[in-house]
Image: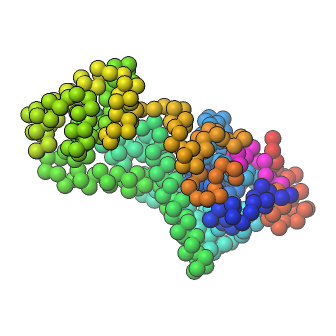
């Protein structure tokens, strides 16, 4: 049976064409990691347990987005004869990604020590919350816990605000992105040296890698303040209860904003002078309050009409649905009309030939089981035995 990938031309196959990935992960960190590889042309085989990825039922939209361009095979790793099938799959793989709690992969027979003996050039990535070793290795958690432990939630987002959490699963995505980059680098190395690598990837260090751009400056201040905070850089509520964003931190931008908004007197206030001279906190709070009062006198549409295109760092706070309708996207070749079976908002990498036309929807559970089995090189009798004993299953 020919897969959709077999029909692709050399030009649109993607820069990672020829890389084969076995993905034993579920929910978001591992699947988002392998989604990026798949978008870039890698062949990703999603190895699911008989119950399938939990996200299929919990968050079907997330599942559809994070598992596009993949194939699915159902394998019961706990079955007695699963080892032979795993070995056949691993021999043809470049990468393995797993997201079990440390130690579980080994118990299932898919740990690095065993698989690297089968395929010495294998790049093997374990994605966990806190890392494969240490006193927290077995600690359970979800995104908000990793954000809290990494110190990210203590970093305020704007002047006068306390800790807040983004609606995006930042920890999961941070680990997924850093792991995907590390995988590509290690596969390049493996193709030169013939040696694979084990990647001990985790949410905690990935988040701390991101947060250093804020923490380093904070640690170097005598008064413990956060230098990135500025009352002229934040969100403000409008007359109609919506929000706009302003980032008029440079004097030229603030002066332009004041000229347009008719508040040039702010430039002459002691609050503005004191804050710009020495970052005085009291002055900053007073300046913020003046801006709050000013912004609340007009609607979001009024501010948009006044400031759009006027060389002022400004943007209305849009919903995701509103953002998808921005003409700016289409002008840059980003078509937000989804291909059949894919959720709206499909944004592959900005590489020619990697547009939505080549996208494939997330697979049904076990949709490609027979197709993948045929490609392992196992005999028909062996495949029939695997089916009979419940080691593998097809689309339900």
Residue in the foreground of this view, choosing between 80 and 317: 317
Which residue is located at x 54 percent, y 46 percent? Answer: 331
Residue in the foreground of this view, choosing between 188 and 291: 291
Segment colored magenta: 360-370
- The location of residue 241, given as percent across then percent down, is 38, 20
- The location of residue 192, given as percent across then percent down, is 58, 79
Q: Note whether residue 138 is visible.
A: no
> Please, which residue is most extreme toward the right here?
381
Is 147 situated left or right of 119 in this image? Answer: left
Q: Quadrant of residue 39?
A: bottom right
- The location of residue 347, given as percent across then percent down, is 58, 47
What is the tally of numbered marks visible in this picture? 0
In the image, is residue 78 part of the stretch drawn in magenta? no
Q: Main secondary structure of the magenta part?
A: loop
In the image, is residue 361 part of the stretch drawn in magenta? yes
- The location of residue 340, given as percent across then percent down, is 72, 41
């Amino acid at each position: 049976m020919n897969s959709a990938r077999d029909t692709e031309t050399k030009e649109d196959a993607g820069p990672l064409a020829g890389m084969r990935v076995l993905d034993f992960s579920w929910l978001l960190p591992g699947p988002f990691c392998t989604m990026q590889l798949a978008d870039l042309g890698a062949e990703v085989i999603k190895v699911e347990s008989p119950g399938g990825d939990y996200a299929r039922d919990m968050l079907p939209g997330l599942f559809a987005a994070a598992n596009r361009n993949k194939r699915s095979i159902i394998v019961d790793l706990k079955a007695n004869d699963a080892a032979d099938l795993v070995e056949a799959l691993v021999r043809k793989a470049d990468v393995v990604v797993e997201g079990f709690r440390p130690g579980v992969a080994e118990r299932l027979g898919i740990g690095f020590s065993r698989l690297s003996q089968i395929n010495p050039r294998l790049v093997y990535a374990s994605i966990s919350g806190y890392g494969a070793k240490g006193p927290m290795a077995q600690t359970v958690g979800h995104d908000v816990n990793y954000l809290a432990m990494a110190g990210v939630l203590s970093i305020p987002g704007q002047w006068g605000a306390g800790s807040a959490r983004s609606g995006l699963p930042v920890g999961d995505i941070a680990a997924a992105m850093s792991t995907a980059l590390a995988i590509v680098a290690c596969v390049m190395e493996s193709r030169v040296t013939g040696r694979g690598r084990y990647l001990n990837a985790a949410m905690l260090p990935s988040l701390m890698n991101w947060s250093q751009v804020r923490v380093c400056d904070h640690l170097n201040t005598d008064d413990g303040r956060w230098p990135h905070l500025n009352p002229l850089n934040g969100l403000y509520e409008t007359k109609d209860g919506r929000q706009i964003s302003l980032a008029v931190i440079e004097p030229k931008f603030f002066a332009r904003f004041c000229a347009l908004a008719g508040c040039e007197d702010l430039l002459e206030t002691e609050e503005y002078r004191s804050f710009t001279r020495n970052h005085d906190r009291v002055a900053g709070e007073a300046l913020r309050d003046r801006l709050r009062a000013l912004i609340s006198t007009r609607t979001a549409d009024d501010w948009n009409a006044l400031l759009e295109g006027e060389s002022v760092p400004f943007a209305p706070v849009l919903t995701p649905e509103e953002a998808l309708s921005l003409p700016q996207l289409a002008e840059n070749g980003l078509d937000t009309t989804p291909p059949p079976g894919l959720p709206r908002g499909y944004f592959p990498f900005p590489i020619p030939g990697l547009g939505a036309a080549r996208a494939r929807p997330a697979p049904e559970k076990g949709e490609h089981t027979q197709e993948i089995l045929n490609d392992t090189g196992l005999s028909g009798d062996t495949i029939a035995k695997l089916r009979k004993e419940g080691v593998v299953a097809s689309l339900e």
